[in-house]
Image (cartoon, grey):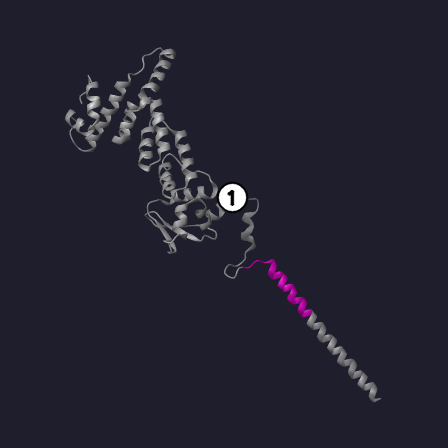
């Protein structure tokens, strides 16, 4: 009988061992399942995972995703304090480094900014947002009132594609009322290609531009370029022939148009400097211009 009892004990021992082994396998399966669940759910240690917030990517192009991240300030890693109000706005370093050597030096160079927020006091927030939108999407968002400030930003950060787009926009919008302003702004911002386009427009519309008050927007240097242009007479001559052939009217005289422009500019300078408008003061503000144009006037004081 004793051997049988031992056998039973042995069986109980085996049964206990098998149960214990089964529990271990069940625990391993549970751990494996949990591990797979964790792998399929990309949880960042610092950012909780919210599946409902990830739906914005669906149906969007890569450019649209970039624009969304900028507009909604997603994962920005560089921040700016913009304008006189010091509005805080974020961006992504890799986008800025891709388009501007100025940003590259600012963010990665030997004298890189180490502050958490970079101050940009000379640009308003609206223009800066439009600038960043171009960087992210290559879409130009400007108006007649903001295009010159955008040109300043493009120059400041040396973003050549943006400057090219702005020049094309201004050239397409050029008018008799804006040509002189554009030429002066291009001169101030040192954009030779735009200054040349403005001068060509003025040459093509010499009479209308030179006899308008907008000529007062020019500095002395730009005015000299206009009235001394070799193409001015030739281009006006072509316009005169077209007028005589099509409208049978006499074209405006070139010398009179040029003199009118110089006179208007000199008068404006006298008023600006708060001196009486006299021939002597006009000659004084004209300086070297006087010798060239004084003999041309028969009905105007200069």
Label total for image? 1
Q: Secondary structure at mark 1?
A: helix
Position of residue 35 in the picture relative to residue 222 (left or right) = right
- The residue beneath circle 1 is 64
Taking depth in this image into account, of 121 and 240 the one nearest to the observer is 240
* Residue 71 is one of the magenta-drawn residues: no
Horizontal side of 235 relative to 1 (left or right) equals left
Residue located at (29% from left, 26% from top)? 226
The residue range painted magenta reads 26-43
Magenta: main secondary structure equals helix
Tell me: residue 238, above or below residue 89.
Answer: above
**Looking at this view, is 99 or 256 the one in front?**
99
Above or below, 196 against 82 in this view is above
Q: Say if residue 79 shows up in the picture.
A: no
Q: Residue at x 35, y 29 (%)?
A: 198
Residue 89 drawn at (x, y percent): 40, 50
Q: Residues within 10 Å of mark 1 (few under 14, many from 20)?
A: some
Residue farthest right in this picture: 1
Indicate the position of residue 249 as horizontal and vertical percent values.
33, 12
The percent position of residue 66, horizontal first and vertical second, equals 50, 46
Q: Looking at the rendering, in which quadrant would you find the C terminus?
A: top left
Q: Quadrant of the N terminus?
A: bottom right
Q: Position of residue 242 (x, y in %)?
A: 37, 14
């Amino acid at each position: 009988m004793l051997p049988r009892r031992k056998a039973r004990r042995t069986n109980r021992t085996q049964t206990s061992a098998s149960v214990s082994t089964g529990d271990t396998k069940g625990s391993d399966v549970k751990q494996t399942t949990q591990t797979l669940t964790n792998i399929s759910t990309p949880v960042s240690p610092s950012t909780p995972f919210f599946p409902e917030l990830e739906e914005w990517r669906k149906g969007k192009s890569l450019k649209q995703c970039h624009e969304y991240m900028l507009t909604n300030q997603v994962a920005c890693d560089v921040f700016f304090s913009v304008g006189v109000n010091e509005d805080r706005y974020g961006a992504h370093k890799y986008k800025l480094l891709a388009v501007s050597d100025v940003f590259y030096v600012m963010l990665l160079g030997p004298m890189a900014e180490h502050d958490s927020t970079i101050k940009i006091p000379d640009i308003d927030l609206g223009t800066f947002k439009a600038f960043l939108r171009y960087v992210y999407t290559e879409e130009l968002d400007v108006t007649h009132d903001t295009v010159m400030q955008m040109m300043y930003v493009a120059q400041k950060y040396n973003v050549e594609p943006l400057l090219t787009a702005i020049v094309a926009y201004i050239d397409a919008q050029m008018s008799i009322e804006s040509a002189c302003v554009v030429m002066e702004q291009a001169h101030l911002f040192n954009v030779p290609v735009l200054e040349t386009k403005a001068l060509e427009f003025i040459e093509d519309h010499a009479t209308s531009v030179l006899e308008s008050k907008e000529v007062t927007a020019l500095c002395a240097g730009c005015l000299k370029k206009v009235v001394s242009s070799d193409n001015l007479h030739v281009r006006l001559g072509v316009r005169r022939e077209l007028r005589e052939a099509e409208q049978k009217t006499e074209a405006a005289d070139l010398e009179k148009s040029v003199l009118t422009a110089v006179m208007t500019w000199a008068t404006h300078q006298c008023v600006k400097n708060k001196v009486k408008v006299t021939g002597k003061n006009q000659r004084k503000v004209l300086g070297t211009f006087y010798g060239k144009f004084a003999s041309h006037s028969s009905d105007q004081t200069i």
